[in-house]
Amino acid sequence: MATPLQRLSSTYLVEQAVLGEQSKVVCLRFGQDFSPECMKMDEVLSSAAQAVEPGCSIYAVDVREVPECISEFQLTSPAQLIFFFRGKPLELDLGAGPQKKVEFTLSSRQEFLDLAE
């Protein structure tokens, strides 16, 4: 069963989510909630949320509500993921060297589970 993503609608809530969690990875999806890319990404993330919940919290951030995130995280794609642990962005091996952002739309639950492990 898909779990609705918790939405962070202010800079304060984004900071609390990233800095407040000390024992789990925090995954933030940045974008505009009603863009096709974000809707697809949210569907994938929601379908995986329960499976990763013991070790990863997933949140959605609409950059229209929190525009400061665009410059803070140098967001350029319609839907992006950034993973944090203890307040710091994690580097991911996405096949082209270490990256701090996933800048493509995930196509499946398994694709996210592979990233989150």
Image (tube, grey):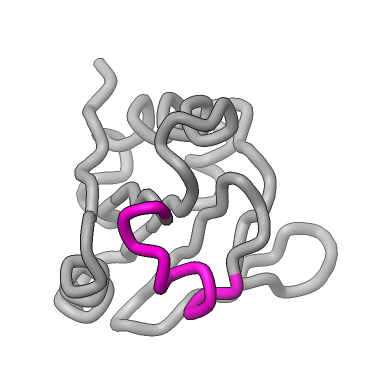
Q: In the picture, residue 68 is in which quadrant?
A: bottom left
Q: Is residue 65 left or right of residue 110?
A: left
Asked if residue 69 is among those painted magenta in the image, a careful observer would answer yes
Q: Is residue 16 left or right of residue 103?
A: left
Q: Residue at point 22% right, 80% down?
A: 19
Q: Position of residue 13 (x, y in %)?
A: 17, 67
Q: Position of residue 87 (x, y in %)?
A: 32, 83
Instruction: Give the vertical position of 7 relative to 39 (above or below).
Output: below
Report the magenta residues as a range.
64-74
Q: Residue at point 34% right, 62% down?
A: 66
Q: Is residue 41 left or right of residue 63?
A: right
Q: Position of residue 100 (x, y in %)?
A: 60, 72
Question: Which of these two is toward me, 34 or 15?
Answer: 34
Farthest residue toward the top?
1
Asked if residue 68 is among those painted magenta in the image, a careful observer would answer yes
Q: Position of residue 1 (x, y in %)?
A: 25, 16
Question: Which of these two is toward me, 72 or 64?
Answer: 64
Q: Residue at point 66% right, 53% down?
A: 77
Q: Is residue 46 left or right of residue 53?
A: right
Instruction: Give the vertical position of 60 relative to 63 (above or below).
Output: above
Q: In the picture, residue 94 is in which quadrant?
A: bottom right
Instruction: Give the vertical position of 88 relative to 93 (above or below).
Output: below
Q: Residue at point 25% right, 72% down?
A: 11
